[in-house]
Amino acid sequence: MGPHPLLLTVEDPAACVGSGGATLNALLVAAEHLSARAGCTVVTADVLREARILILHMGRDFPFDDCSRAFTCLPVEDPDAPAEALTCNLDSLLGTMTQQLCRGSPPGVWVCSTDMLLTVPLAAEIHWEGFQGAKVISVPGSVSYARNHGVYLANQQGFVRDIIYQGPEAQIQECAGPDGKVPLVCGVVFFSSETAEQLLATHVIPPLDACTYLGLDSGLSLFFDIVLCMADGVTEEDFGAAALRSARSVLWKALHAIPLSMVCIPDGCYDYMTMAASDHIHNLTLRTSSANALPFRKVAHSHIAQPQLLEDGCSVTNSLLEGAVRVEPGSVLQHCHLQGPLQIGSGCLLTGLDVSSSPALQRCRLHDVVLQGHAIRLPTSHCLLSPPSQSPAGEAGTYLNVPWAEFFHRTGIREGDIWGSEVPRRSRCLLNARLFPVLHAAEPLGVQDVLWFLGSQEGEGLGRWRASWRMSWEQLLMCLDQEAELASRRALFFRQAQGKLRRVLLEHRDCSLLPLIHTAVSEGYQEAVLSTLDQVASVAADPGVAARALACIADVLGCMAKGDGGLRSGPAANREWAPAFQQLERGDIAEGVKALATERRKWLGRPALLVRAARHYEGAEQILIRQAVMSACRFINVGREEPPPVGHWVLVECPARIDVSGGWSDTPPITYEHGGAVVDIAILVDGRRPIGARARRIAEPELRLVSASGALEGEVVLELVCQDLEDLQDYCQPHAPGALLKAAFICTQIVTLASQKPLQAQLLECSGGGFEVHSWSSLPHGSGLGTSSILAGAVMAALYRAAGKSANAESLIHAVLHLEQVLTTGGGWQDQVGGLVPGIKIGRSKALLPLKVEVEQIPVPEGFPQTLNQHLLLIYTGKTRLARNLLQDVLRNWYARLPAIVQNADALVSNAEQCAQAFRQGNLPLLGECLTRYWQQKKCMAPGCEPLAVRRMMDALQPYVYGQSLAGAGGGGFLYILTKEPSQKDFIQQILANTEGLGNFSIHTVEVDTAGFSLQLVGSDPKARGDTGNERAQPVM
C-alpha cells in the first residue's frame, strides 16, 4: 500500500448478501470514489486501469467473537512493530496480502475473505510475467480436510478446470499433486484491471443490477458463481443448470473467455474458522506446531501474576490474571480480568469476563465449556455458556455436552420456559432458546446466573433465572454493542499494559516500551501511562530503574508533541524545574519525582512546551545516572605521601588512546545495566605523549589555573585565578572556563564547595597555601582519542601527589568516572583505561552496581607491538565531532531498549572479546575484521556519526587496509587504519591527496606506549625532567 491509501467501509446492500454480490457492490463503490477523485461526474471503468484495490470480506456473525472473525484476536506479539497493539485476524491477513501475496502484482483487484487463518512463507513467489485474466491463490491441504471445503482442479499449465466443493473423495483425489496434497480454495483471488472492468460492467445488466446497493441481493457467490464461470473445464450447460440461472447466464457471457490460473503456495497454511468451539480452540492453541503458521504465543499482551500455572497448550490473550489462576492445556482465555485462586480445566473458551466474575468461578471447576461475557445495548452485560448450535432440541440435541432432557432434569428448567408455543418443535434449538439472562429487576447480573446450569436445581439459581429477563442467542446478536466491546478490550489492554510497564522496569528487562508508549498516546491513555511511570520511579530502590522510568516519561511527552516543538536534544535549565532537580540531587527520589509530575502538568499545552518538558525529564534522568555512577567512588583508594616542597612541580604525562572494539558499552547506564567490554591501546602520537598536567603548591592561598589545548588547530591558552568559593561555582558547566580543573579540585577533596569556611581558609588549613595547576593537550578538540578523560586523570594524579596523596591507575580510573559525572559530561570509562594503563588491554564492567571497572593486560606475541606500530596510522579528518548530541541520542535509544540497540550492545561486547583474542594471536587480518565490524556497530549505535567526507576517505583507503574506524564516538576527529603493508604513511598521503572532497587532513604515526602514564617530581623548574624523583603508575591487573 502507498503512504495514503483510500479506506472505504462498504455496507452490504441487504442482509445475507452473497460474497459475489458483495464483491460487485464493493467494486462499484470503489469505482465511484476513484471516479470522483479523477474529476468525473459519473462512474467510469477507466479509473480501474491503474488502480490497486484490495477488498476484504468481513463475513458472517461468529459465535466466539462479538466483533466477527475479522476482529478475532490472535495470540501474537510483534516486538518489531512501531506500535504495540492486539493483533486480530484482519491485521494478519492484511499483512499477508500486502507484504507477500500482492507484492509485485500488476494493477487490479484483490479479493480476500476474513473467515480463515492464512499464512504463507516469506519466500513465496508469484510470477506475473504475461499474466492476463484472474488468478486464484491456493495452499496445499489433505484430502480428508478438503472433504468439507473447496478444492481446485487445475491442469499442468496451472489453469483452473473446475472448483469442487464438498465433493466425494474420489473426485477430490483427482485434484491431488504428486505429494498427495490437494489445492484448497482459501478465499483469495486476483482480477486484472481488464477483468475487473468486465466484472463491473455486469452491474447494469439484469438481474445482476440487483446485486449492488442500487437494487436487491441475488445471493451471488464469489467463487462458485463469478470465479467458477472462468474455469475452462466447466460447460455452459453445467454452469447454467444451477440456481440463479439468469444471473449465471450473464456472468458466463461476460467472463467465461477470461483465463483463470492458479498458484499453489508450497508450505502455506489455511484453517477455516468454523462454528465449532473445538476447532476455534484448536486454532488458537495447537497451530504453533506449524513452522509456517503465525508465531502464536502461549501468553500475548497479558499480565499473569503466576505464569508457572499456565500449562503448555493453553492460550491467554489480552487478559489480566491476578493471584493463582491455573489454566490447563487446550483452553483459551481472551479479554478476561480474573482473580485467583481459580482453575480452568481443559477444553474451555473464556472471553470478556471481568473481575466480578471471579468469586462465582472460584466455586466451580470449568471443563469443556464456552463462557462469554457480552456487551449489549442494555444497562448490563450478559454471560453466555456453551457454544451456540443449530442442533434441534430433539433426542439428538445436546447442550453443555448433555442431551436436552438431561439438562432439563438437572436444572429444573422446563422446555416451555425457553421456547414458546410459537416455536415449532422441529425448529427448537440453542440459537432460539431464551436461556440467557440479560437483566434482573432489582439485582445486578453476574456470571453466576448461567454457571448454575452446570449444577443442580437446588438453591436460588432456578428462581433467579425464572425471574430474569432472558434472550436467545439470535436475539442477543441483534443487541450486541460492538463499540462497547472494543472499548472494553482497549481498556483491558491498557490495564495489563500498566502491569507490563512495572515488570519491565523493575525486573530490568531488555524490552522496548516505545511501541507501547506510541500506542498509549495514540489511543489517549497517556495519563495512565505517566501515572504508572511516576509510581515506578518513586518506589524504585535502584536509581538506574528510576532513571529509565524518567526516560520513558520523556518519550511519552515527546510522542505527545507528535513531531512538532523542536528537537528533543537541548537545554534543561528552566528555573521552574530546579526544585525538583534539587530533590533528586539530595537523593530524595520519591519527592523529586512528585515535584517533577507537579511541574509537568503545567507544560502539556502545546508541542514546544512538551518537548521542553521532555528535555527536563532527560536532565532529571542524568542526575540519577550520576548517582548510580557515583557508586564507583568506593573503588577509589587514596594513600598518604610526603607532599613535595612548596614551589616544586609534579609532572604527569599521558599517552592518547585508540579504542579498537567495544566502545559505547562502557557508557553509563549501558555499562551497569548491560555490562561492558572495551579493547584499548595506549599510543604515542608522532612519537610523543600528547596529554599532560603539572601541579605545585604555592604560598598564596589561591588557585591558579592554566589550560592549553589544540596544537593542530593553533594553541589556545586559558588562565584563571580563583580566590573565593564563588569562583568555583560553575565547575559543573562543561563549557565554563577551567571547569575541568575546578571539578578536579573538588573531586580530590582539596576544596569543599559546601563548606562554611572560605576558600583561602580551607587552603591554608589543609595545605598551608594554594595550588597552581597547568594542563595541556596537543590534540585537537573532538579528536576521539580520549583527550578530556585522560586529561582529567592526569590533572587528578598531579593534584593528589602535590597535596601529599597517592592514587594508583585503578583508583584514577574510577576517580575520573566520578569527576565526569560532577562535570556533567557523563562519559564512560574506556578513555581513562586507554590512557592510564599501558599497552594493549581490555576493560570490563559487569551489569550491576556499584560500578567497578576491571582491566586485563592482553599478552601479545613477542615483537607484535613493533609490528603494530608499522601498520597503524592516524589520519586527522579535519572534522570536529559533536559527541554531546551523539551521546544524548544513544542514551535515549538505549533507555527505549530498541531491539537493534540491545542486539548491538551484545555484539559490541562479543566483538571486544574476539578482538582481544586476535591480539593474543598477533593476527592482523583478524584484527582488521574486528575493526571493520566495530565501525559498523558504532554506526548502528549512533547513526549520523559518519560524515560524507569521512566516507569518501574510507572508501579510498578500503583496498589498502585490513580495517579502519573513526576513533571514539565518531562524527569526526581521527580515523585510525590498519594497513595491509608496513610503513605506508607516504603511500596513504598520496592516495588521499588524489581523492576529492576530503578537506584538510593530516597523517600521524602511532606507537604503542608500553610504559603507561608517567608521574615525576621535577623541582621548581617545570622544564626539568626527573631531577628529584620519577614515579610511574602501576598497571591495573
Image (cartoon, grey):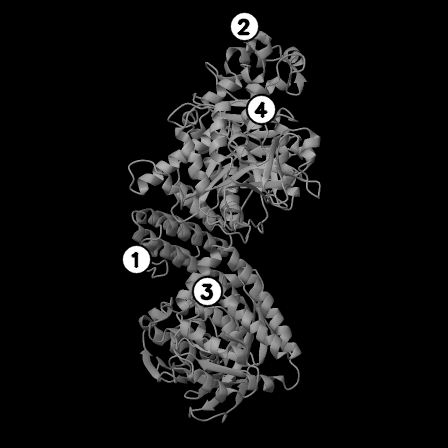
- Residue 640 visible, this angle: no
Tell whether 596 sits left or right of 543.
left
- Residue 190 visible, this angle: yes
The local secondary structure at tag 1 comes to helix
Q: Nearer the viewer, mark 2 or mark 3?
A: 2
- Which of the two discs, 2 and 3, labels the residue nearer the N terminus? 2
The residue labelled by disc 4 is: 360
Label 2: how many residues lie within 10 Å, few (<14), some (14-19) or many (20+)? few
The residue labelled by disc 3 is: 942
Q: Which mark is residue 421?
A: 2
Q: Which mark is residue 575?
A: 1
Kindly identify the amino acid type of the residue bearing the numbered disc 1.
Answer: Arg
Kindly identify the amino acid type of the residue bearing the numbered disc 3.
Answer: Ala
- Which of the two discs, 4 and 2, labels the residue nearer the N terminus? 4
Kindly identify the amino acid type of the residue bearing the numbered disc 2.
Answer: Ser
Label 1: how many residues lie within 10 Å, few (<14), some (14-19) or many (20+)? few
* Cα–Cα gap, marks 1 and 4: 56 Å
